[in-house]
Each structure stands twice: as structure tokens, then as C-alpha cells.
Amino acid sequence: MARKFSGDRLVIASHNAGKVREMIELMAPFGVEVHTAEALGLAEPEETGTTFRANGELKARASALGAKLPAFADDSGLVVPALNGDPGIYSARWAGETRDFGIAMNLVEDALKKTGASPEDANAYFVSALCLCWPDGHVENFEGEVHGTLSFPPRGDNGFGYDPIFVPDGYNVTFGEMPAVEKHALSHRARAFEKLVAACFQSDG
């Protein structure tokens, strides 16, 4: 059985402004005082894991130990089967040191063209691995996915990362064109968060 979260303070173990914003919005209904790793002066650990889950644990554990508070981390990325799963766990690195996802989206399009595949309507999916870690080292992990297709050129200024090129199944707009409340209803991060809440934030009764 998963450990229940019983505190009133939590660290979001991320320095990504877009990701922090979404995670704060997801946590809002629970009345928890949220701090960010950046605001607490906690360094970003090197992401040396070979899976989303491993990297999520690295980040959550570093913040939990550094702040001596439970920490909540996400490792997520865009998986494109035609690119053998790239950019995958290296999704942020494709954006370079400046985290320019305009560059990253262009790289995805160019890579698809080199395979001979049409970038438009290429299958893709987002993965989110959420980790909740306590200062004693205990961790709980949850994963979510949302499947869809790619669309070029990028459309929409909402969201962050690869959102402007991702059209979720059943929709004709990109995540970048969706209001936050609509994206939160179906995103990979929201699906992983639903599992976390069911396991760690709700009572047994």
C-alpha cells in the first residue's frame, strides 16, 4: 500500500517554470503550502537515469533531502516511435542549454524528414513519471501517458515545451492552443497525478 501524504508543506523539485506552474495548479485543491526547489536554492541534480522514472526519483530525492521536506518531481518527455523513441528522456536536452523548444521542435521535424516519414501526423506520445519522495528516502512512483500526432508548424502559445506540435487523439488543436484547464483534464502529467492522488492523498475510507 502506498504511503499517505500527511504534511502541509511540499517541495516541487523542478527548475522548469512551465512545469512548476502546471504542478502548482495541480496541487492547488489540496491546501498544501508549496515551495519550489529554485526558490529554496536547491541545485538541479544531473539527470543520469535511463528512464523517466529514474530521473524523476533523482530530482525528488535531491529536493527531499536538501529541504528536509517531502518533494514532488516530474520527469517527462515526448516519445516519437518513428525516431526510435527520441527525444524521449532527452527531450529537454534537444532544446539546448538555453531551453529553446523552438529549436527542439525544428529538430524533431528535421529528424522525421530524414527518415523519409512525413512529419505531419506522425504518431507520438507524452510520458510523465511523477515521484513523491520523503526525507527518509521513501518514494512512490506513478506514470501517465497521452497519445496523439504531431503537427507542423507549431501552433499556440499556451503550455510549454513541445505542446505547440502535439495534437492529442480525438482533438484537432494542439496542447499549445488549449486552455490550461482543458489540458489538465487529459495530459500525461494530469493522468499520472490522478494516480498519485488516489494512492497518496485520499483516505482509505
Image: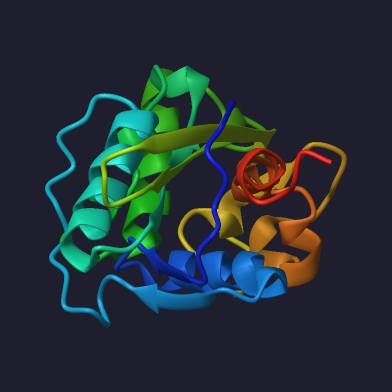
Where's residue 197, x and y in %? Answer: 67, 48
- For residue 36, say whether it is visible: yes
> Foreground: 13 or 15?
13
Where residue 179 sits, quadrant-wise, is: bottom right
Residue lying furthest bottom in this view?
39
Looking at this view, name the residue that lies furthest to the front: 205
Residue at x 15% of width, y 34% of height = 48
Q: Is residue 118 above or below residue 155?
A: above
Give percent across and percent down for residue 59: 26, 49
Q: What is the tally of numbered marks visible in this picture? A: 0
In the displayed structure, does residue 91 sit left or right of residue 175? left
Quadrant that contains the N terminus: top right
Q: Give the residue drawn at x 57%, y 56%.
A: 163
Where residue 90 sits in the image (x, y, percent)? 28, 38
The coloring applied to the image is rainbow
Image quadrant holding the C terminus, namely top right
Give the side of residue 94 with respect to residue 111, left or right. Answer: left
Residue in view at x 27 percent, y 56 percent: 64
Q: Work out whether residue 166 or residue 72 is closer to the camera in this orientation and state it.
A: 72
Residue 117 in the figure: left or right of residue 85: right
Q: In front here: 109 or 43?
A: 43
Residue 105 drawn above or below residue 83: below
Q: Quadrant of residue 192?
A: top right
- Residue 23's place in the image compared with 36, above or below, is above
Camera sees residue 87: no
| Residue at 39% from the left image edge and 77% from the top image edge | 35
